[in-house]
Image (cartoon, rainbow, N blue to C red):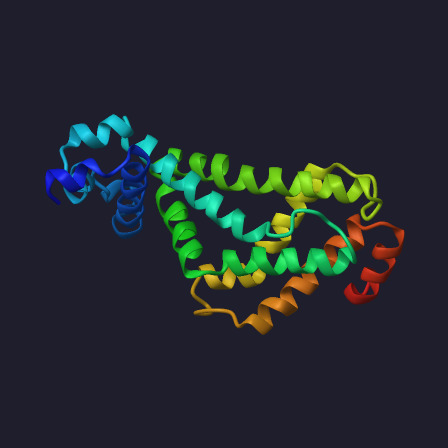
Amino acid sequence: MDLAEAKKITPDERRATILDIAHDAFMRDGYAGASMSRIAAQLGGSKTTLYNYFASKKELFVAVADRESQRLFDQVFVVDQPTGDFRITLTELARRFLAALLSDHVVAGYRLIVAESGRFPEVGQTADQTALERGVSLLARYFQRAIDAGQMRNADPRLAAEQFVDLTCGTLHQKRLWNVIANATPERIAVEAERIANTFLAAFGNDELSRAARQFTGN
């Protein structure tokens, strides 16, 4: 890239390029193996340029994790309002969430976190603060609106959100993480999403939805 082309790149574009390169480096080499020097070399500038944007590898990792979790939940929360038939809406939410969790991209990130967080607690802490906390907070706000609309019983929306995450990260997700299955078909994801929604509604739905859900869960 010549100087004229470099001048056309905005700081936001340069930051996005750094995050792209760093994401690939973390996925390929792990947190320990990723090098700020190699990332700077791939960027095509000096380490000073990289450090002008991110003061440390930890700070860079946090930024990558934050962006990736935002992208994940942008895909999941396409429907922001729990309207219409809440069971159908919730099932679709579970389907989107599960499909995202089972994607190659997200599974690779999960495996990185598990592999590295034992030696580097900041990796697990970053995942907790960016991905898990963001997801639970978004779900809690979503469920609070459902509670206000009378679609869910009067419960702690954060507790409901945590339970929903636990259900979604269940058996199918574990099989994918452990490479027991290479992928999950849309049909299998749909069946699992319906199971998740019914189990959740049996516990947190309003009287009508809970009663109907218990017929599906066998309770």
Q: Is residue 132 left or right of residue 122?
A: right
Residue sitting nearer the eye, 84 or 32: 84
Horizontal and vertical percent position of residue 169: 57, 54
Q: Is residue 104 left or right of residue 51?
A: right
Quarter of the figure that contains the N terminus: top left
Which residue is at a point 80% across and 55% down the rendered structure image? 202
* Residue 142 found in image quarter: top right
Q: Is residue 44 visible?
A: no
* Residue 97 found in image quarter: bottom right
Horizontal and vertical percent position of residue 79: 64, 52
Q: Is residue 1 visible?
A: yes
Work out which residue is located at the far left of the displayed protein and give it. Answer: 2
Which residue is at a point 81% across and 61% down the rendered structure image? 213
Q: How many marks?
A: 0
| 216 to 201, vertically: above or below | below
Residue sitting nearer the eye, 35 or 42: 42
Q: Is residue 178 left or right of residue 59?
A: right
Horizontal and vertical percent position of residue 103: 46, 60
Quarter of the figure that contains the C terminus: bottom right
Which residue is at a point 74% across and 39% down the rendered structure image? 144
